[in-house]
Image (cartoon, rainbow, N blue to C red):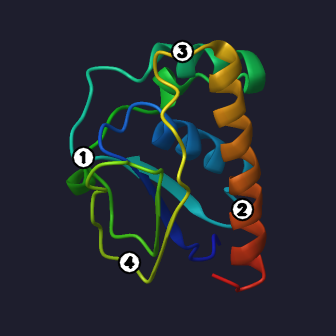
Amino acid sequence: MKKNLPKVAFICVHNSCRSQIAEALGKALASDVFESYSAGTETKPQINQDAVRLMNQKYCIDMEKTQYSKLLSDIPSVDIVITMGCNVDCPYLPCRYREDWGLQDPTGKSDEEFIKTIETIHNKILDLKYRIQEKLV
């Protein structure tokens, strides 16, 4: 029987890059500790293709097979909200805990910048997993 895991939403405005990467890495690295969702206040027709390509190369995760751009209203109620660093009006979603990761959007930048962002998200997912396990969040 699967225990009731906390639900974490990774949100940004367009739900096409950073929040999608966080959802994919959350599912890959922490699905035993929390459920991962991503969403935004607007959607894009497809996930950022550089993010898709680099996540596939680095983790063998095909985000286009398992994910799509979603609105806040498309996901269930969540316990934890992580905003990506919107620099504009970050979307609001009710929750019991919220934090902002302050990440720059790598869209249109070099692969090196994308990889730095992916690695930062990877490390933040592992940190969040630890803090949830230790009941620090």
Q: What residue sits right under mark 1 in the picture? A: 71
Q: Nearer the viewer, mark 1 or mark 3?
A: 3
Q: Quadrant of residue 110?
A: top right
Residue at 39% x, 31% y: name it: 16
First along the sequence among labels 2 and 4? 2
Within 10 Å of disc 3 (Cα), the crowding (few <14, some 14-19, many 20+) is some
Q: Nearer the viewer, mark 2 or mark 1?
A: 1
First along the sequence among labels 1 and 3? 3
Q: CA distance from mark 4 to mark 3?
A: 31 Å
Q: CA distance from mark 2 to mark 1?
A: 25 Å
The amino acid pointed to by label 2 is Asp
Question: In the rendered image, which quarter contains the N terminus?
Answer: bottom right
The amino acid pointed to by label 1 is Leu
Q: CA distance from mark 2 to mark 4?
A: 20 Å
The amino acid pointed to by label 3 is Asp
The amino acid pointed to by label 4 is Cys
First along the sequence among labels 1 and 4? 1
Residue at 65% x, 24% y: name it: 113
Q: Which mark is residue 1?
A: none
Tell me: 92 left or right of 96.
left
Q: Which mark is residue 50?
A: 3
Q: Secondary structure at mark 3?
A: helix
Within 10 Å of disc 4 (Cα), the crowding (few <14, some 14-19, many 20+) is some
Q: Position of residue 9 (x, y in %)?
A: 44, 59
Q: What residue sits right under mark 2 in the picture? A: 32
Tell me: 14 left or right of 49.
left
Q: Nearer the viewer, mark 2 or mark 4?
A: 4
